[in-house]
């Protein structure tokens, strides 16, 4: 099945420190749609909740223009005992169909490698870095599948945390170069290798690269930026109220200078207290700097703990995180 970019989601690319399409500068504002990283490997489904047109239109109704879709490398590759009904061609077809549906509704799709694992270990959770065993094969296949769809962005690894979650020279060396790394028990595929893998597959798509410390530390990003012959890389930032870089001071000192060199896309943000005040602060700052952001998460996991946007898949917002986000997005339309 050939992916297509149709509807309102025209091709997107990097130009200097901006994302652009045929109409001009694009700032991505959207949601994370969790489920495709865990339902398959747990053996009970492909999505957690609906993936039909009505559910996508509910996301669109908030004023979004992007959806981040977390992926599982074992499910995509059909390895390590994932049930066949939820793996390999069945999984790939489901993701392709969902991406096409997003695009048809004017939404960009961000595909991220969320759950992975080395060797014969089943990918049932987050790892500190991509594994040499499967992650290059995963990105070869994903890039080959979507290389004809410029409305798809590749987020190469969800939340790196090598060197025991340090923001250190060793962590950044591992991040870029892979190999044998402190705090990682397996051979790592570094970001340079994965960028090269995507390009060797013939895919010109925009690539997102999250920093260390669960994509929250970006101070070493520019110094370790992988070489990309197409110059189509963006920095991915994850920003929660409990992270180290969660203050205006850090944003001004680290994120703003980076955003003057490359596009910055906040692949995840949210807060765990349901107040919405941190989210409001971040969105206001990000809007002033032209930084993109996608909120975690468009899933019905219950509103009491925060970091959940909705009470149902028709888009009824949680109080206050969901309400704050919905109202802010609609105010920008």
Image: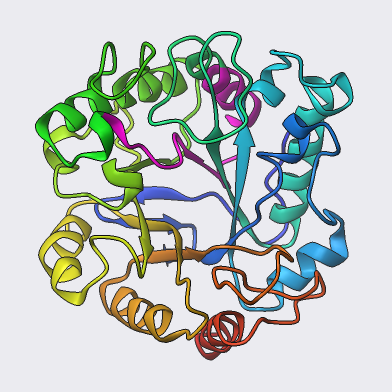
What's the residue at 77%, 46% (across, down)? 98
Examine the structure image and report whether residue 84 is included in the region drawn in magenta: no
User: Camera-side residue: 59 or 312?
Assistant: 312
Q: Position of residue 241 (x, y in %)?
A: 35, 70
User: Camera-side residue: 277 or 21?
Assistant: 277
Residue 227 visible, this orientation: no
| In this view, 246 is above or below 109 | below
What's the residue at 53%, 34% (across, down)? 113
Q: Which residues are magenta?
A: 138-162
Residue 137 visible, this orientation: yes
Q: Position of residue 201 (x, y in %)?
A: 51, 17
Examine the structure image and report whether residue 154 is included in the region drawn in magenta: yes
Q: Position of residue 228 (x, y in %)?
A: 29, 28
Q: Quadrant of residue 31?
A: bottom right
What's the residue at 72%, 51% (across, down)? 6
| In this view, 127 is above or below 295 | above
């Amino acid at each position: 099945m050939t992916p297509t970019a149709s509807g309102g989601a025209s091709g997107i690319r990097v130009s200097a420190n901006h994302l652009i399409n045929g109409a001009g500068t694009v700032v991505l504002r959207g949601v994370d749609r969790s489920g495709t990283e865990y339902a398959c490997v747990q053996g009970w489904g492909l999505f957690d909740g609906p993936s039909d047109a009505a559910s996508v239109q509910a996301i669109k109704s908030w004023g979004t223009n992007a959806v981040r879709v977390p992926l599982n490398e074992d499910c995509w590759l059909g390895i390590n005992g994932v049930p066949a009904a939820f793996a390999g061609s069945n999984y790939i077809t489901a993701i392709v169909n969902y991406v096409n549906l997003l695009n048809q509704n004017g939404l960009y799709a961000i595909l991220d490698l969320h759950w992975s694992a080395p060797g014969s270990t089943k990918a049932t959770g987050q790892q500190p870095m991509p594994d040499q065993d499967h992650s290059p094969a995963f990105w070869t296949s994903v890039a080959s599948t979507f290389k004809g769809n410029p409305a798809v962005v590749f987020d190469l690894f969800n939340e790196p945390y090598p060197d025991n979650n340090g923001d250190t020279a060793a962590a950044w060396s591992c991040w870029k170069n892979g190999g044998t790394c402190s705090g990682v028990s397996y051979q790592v595929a570094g970001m340079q290798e994965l960028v090269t893998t995507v390009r060797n597959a013939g895919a010109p798509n925009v690539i997102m690269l999250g920093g260390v410390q669960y994509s929250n530390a970006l101070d070493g990003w520019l110094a370790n930026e992988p070489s990309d012959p197409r110059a189509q890389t963006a920095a991915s930032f994850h920003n929660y109220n409990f992270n180290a870089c969660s203050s205006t001071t850090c944003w001004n000192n680290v994120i703003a200078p980076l955003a003057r060199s490359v596009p910055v896309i906040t692949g995840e943000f949210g807060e765990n207290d349901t107040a919405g005040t941190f989210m409001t602060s971040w969105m206001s700052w990000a809007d002033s700097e032209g930084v993109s952001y996608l909120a975690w998460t468009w899933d019905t996991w219950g509103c009491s703990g925060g970091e959940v946007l909705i009470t149902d898949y028709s888009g009824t917002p949680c109080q206050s995180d969901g309400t704050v986000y919905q109202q802010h997005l609609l105010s920008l339309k």
